[in-house]
């Protein structure tokens, strides 16, 4: 192929899938795994915070000084902030599971993007060449839409 009069460019390719029972199940399982990971992170964080606070209390004078009390409060604030962020992520994942459950079979939905390269030459319509999408069914390419 003579590429002397061609320009190699990069484009974003939209990935779509046809909703099938298998795809719904797999997608929901992926979201559930992420939820389980978040739950584990929250438990680990709470355990580490309890251990850190117990260690601080063990090493401090009784009653604890204002600095020690402030240090403990700072740990609790940080844990609560991190926990709030993780719980928000969990809530978003639960909402996504609900959305997947509501999708109709055989409906096409966006599932992500990839990048690809293409040649552009004199006379090509750049806008048509930029609009390419791949349609999947259970991970298998069913169609490539657009000008390659």
Image: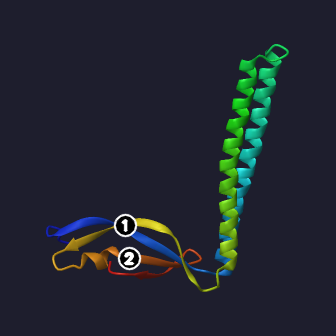
Identify the secondary structure beneath mark 2: loop
Identify the secondary structure beneath mark 1: strand
* Label of residue 132 in the image: 2
Label 1 sits on residue: 116
Q: Is residue 120 left or right of residue 88?
A: left
Quadrant including the C terminus: bottom left
Please identify the residue farthest to the front as the structure is shown. Answer: 66
Tell me if mark 1 has few (under 14), some (14-19) or many (20+) residues whose alpha carbon lies within 10 angstroms of its own: few
Q: Nearer the viewer, mark 1 or mark 2?
A: 2
Residue 3 position (above or below residue 79):
below
Tell me if mark 2 has few (under 14), some (14-19) or many (20+) residues whose alpha carbon lies within 10 angstroms of its own: some
Q: Is residue 64 left or right of residue 38?
A: right
Between 95 and 1, the one nearer to me in the picture: 95
Q: Residue at x 15, y 76 (%)?
A: 122
Q: Position of residue 120 (x, y in %)?
A: 23, 72
Between 18 and 3, the one nearer to me in the picture: 18
Scheme of image coloration = rainbow
The image quarter in which residue 1 lies: bottom left
């Amino acid at each position: 192929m003579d590429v002397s009069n061609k320009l190699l460019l990069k484009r974003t390719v939209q990935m779509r899938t046809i909703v099938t029972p298998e795809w719904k199940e797999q997608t929901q399982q992926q979201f559930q795994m992420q939820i389980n990971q978040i739950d584990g992170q929250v438990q680990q964080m709470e355990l580490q915070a309890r251990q850190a606070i117990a260690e601080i209390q063990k090493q401090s004078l009784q009653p604890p000084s204002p600095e020690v009390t402030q240090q403990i409060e700072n740990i609790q604030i940080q844990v609560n902030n991190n926990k709030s962020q993780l719980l928000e992520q969990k809530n978003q994942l639960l909402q996504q599971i609900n959305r997947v459950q509501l999708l109709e079979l055989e409906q096409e939905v966006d599932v992500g993007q990839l990048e690809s390269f293409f040649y552009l030459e004199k006379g090509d319509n750049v806008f048509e060449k930029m609009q390419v999408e791949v349609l999947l069914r259970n991970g298998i390419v069913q169609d490539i839409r657009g000008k390659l």
